[in-house]
Image (cartoon, rainbow, N blue to C red):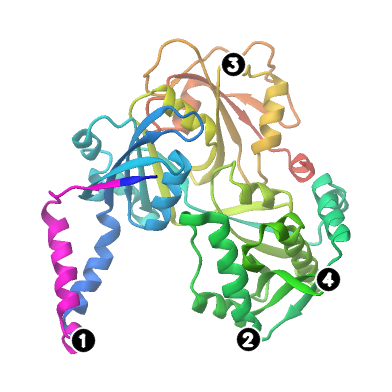
């Protein structure tokens, strides 16, 4: 179980903010109108004064002790990050609020003992963090599927597996625009499945938001022997279809094993294609490359086309076995110079041979990424600021192709992850996407 210590000495504006909220709630309703300008100003300033915690626990994958400084403005992203880094066991000490520009400059020094800093930041305010303060990871990425799907996609093992599930469980679909059935979908499928799937980190849009999307679209229900087991909300905007959200009846995992989710996507893509659409947008996904939803969508196959304005900025203050473990266990998509790239860290025990690179690309390279960069930790000195080795790995030729592998120079590799911090010495190799190969993966 996780525990949270609330510090009594929340200073300055933190106390003032708490006092203002208490005073606002104490006002009679007819008097609150005079406080609205103050409240609006407070809402505008909220992204500039994130909450700050010091969190300690064991890194989820390695069980090594890790201490981080976390600043966030939303409970949604805070919960997701803590689950990603620590799982369900950690200890968080709340420090209050700070100005955004102090997150990387003074807060970690004041807190002391932290080896990593994580900051949730809106894109508009990234410059306030200062140059080279961290590496930028989108909170969400967006993707789409080209329609019709070609013969290469339709013959992939992953697609044939979905078709086999549909046949074995006699799954069918039905289209509905009935508002009463929307209520059933929202509460008993979408919300129920999201809570079951994500637990404390679950986030779902309000009924009003989903209803507005339904008004410009329709519901697709998946049936098994006459029972409606899952559904998909499909939206249309005139130029493309959008798969807005999916749900499973009562969050039932047995239905998921029967193919309720994969069938909802398969039938929805067929529906969009039948209606003449050539593009189908997919709901947002997390930017961590081992995320199950992101990996599932790659098999549809998804092409990544953009990122959300919400960002996660990460910096390593001290290289430890735990920070290395976090980087190795959580490959991610990051932004650099207007491009989206994949980033994978590997142990020095994995030699950067063509075979190893091919396997890394097979697992983590997504269509739409500019490149996937693999950093191989080198044995030896630790604690350097982005120390990149220049020696080319033995057995790997720069002429290797399909996909193309490029050994990055120290200057190129350092610039690419500028701001990430102390990661020790590494060898960096870029895996460039092959357009035909990306469509054939899995």
Q: CA distance from mark 1 to mark 4?
A: 54 Å
Residue 423 picture location, percent across and down: 42, 24
Q: Nearer the viewer, residue 39 or 162?
A: 162
N-term mark: 2 or 1 = 1
The answer to whether the residues at label 2 and label 1 have Cβ atoms under 8 Å apart is: no
Residue linked to disc 1: 29
The answer to whether the residues at label 2 and label 4 have Cβ atoms under 8 Å apart is: no
Residue linked to disc 3: 349
- Figure quadrant of residue 12: bottom left
Residue 14 picture location, percent across and down: 16, 56
Residue linked to disc 2: 180
The image shows residue 258, relative to residue 37, as above or below, that is above
| Label drawn at residue 225 | 4
N-term mark: 2 or 3 = 2
- Figure quadrant of residue 321: top left
Q: Secondary structure at mark 1?
A: helix
N-term mark: 3 or 1 = 1
């Amino acid at each position: 179980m996780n525990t949270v210590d609330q510090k009594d000495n929340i200073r300055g504006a933190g106390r003032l903010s708490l006092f203002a909220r208490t005073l606002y709630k104490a006002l009679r309703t007819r008097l609150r109108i005079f406080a609205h300008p103050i409240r609006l100003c407070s809402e505008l300033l909220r992204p500039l004064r994130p909450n700050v915690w010091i969190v300690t626990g064991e890194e989820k994958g390695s069980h090594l002790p890790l201490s981080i400084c976390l600043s966030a403005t939303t409970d949604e992203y805070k919960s997701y990050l803590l689950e990603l880094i620590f799982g369900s066991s950690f200890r968080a000490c709340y420090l209050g609020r700070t100005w955004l520009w102090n997150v990387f400059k003074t807060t970690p020094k004041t807190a002391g003992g932290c080896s990593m800093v994580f900051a949730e930041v809106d894109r508009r305010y990234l410059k306030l963090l200062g140059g080279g303060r961290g590496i930028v990871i989108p909170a969400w990425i967006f993707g789409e599927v080209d329609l019709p799907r070609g013969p290469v996609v339709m013959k992939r093992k992953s697609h044939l597996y979905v078709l086999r599930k549909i046949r074995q469980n006699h799954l069918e679909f039905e289209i509905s625009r009935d508002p009463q059935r929307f209520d059933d979908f929202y509460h008993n499928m979408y919300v129920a499945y999201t809570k079951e799937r994500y637990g404390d980190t679950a986030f779902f849009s309000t009924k009003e938001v989903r209803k507005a999307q339904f008004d410009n679209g329709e519901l697709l229900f998946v049936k098994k022997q006459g029972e409606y087991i899952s559904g998909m909300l499909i939206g249309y905007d005139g130029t493309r279809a959008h798969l807005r959200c999916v749900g499973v009846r009562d969050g039932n995992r047995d239905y998921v094993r029967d193919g309720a989710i994969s069938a909802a996507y398969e039938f929805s893509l067929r529906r969009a294609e039948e209606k003449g659409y050539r593009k189908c947008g997919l709901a947002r996904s997390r930017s961590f490359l081992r995320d199950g939803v992101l990996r599932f969508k790659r098999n549809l196959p998804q092409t990544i086309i953009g990122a959300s304005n919400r960002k996660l900025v990460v910096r390593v203050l001290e290289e430890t076995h735990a920070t290395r473990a976090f980087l190795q266990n959580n490959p991610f998509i990051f932004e650099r110079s207007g491009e989206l790239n994949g980033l994978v860290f590997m142990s020095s025990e994995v030699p950067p041979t063509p075979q190893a690179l091919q396997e890394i690309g097979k697992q983590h390279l997504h269509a739409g990424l500019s490149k996937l960069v693999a950093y191989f930790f080198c044995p030896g000195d630790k604690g350097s600021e982005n120390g990149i080795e220049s020696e080319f790995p033995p057995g790997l030729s720069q002429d290797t192709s399909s996909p193309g592998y490029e050994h990055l120079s120290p200057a190129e590799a350092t610039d690419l992850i500028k701001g990430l911090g102390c990661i020790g010495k590494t060898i960096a190799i870029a895996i460039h996407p092959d357009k035909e190969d990306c469509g054939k993966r899995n």
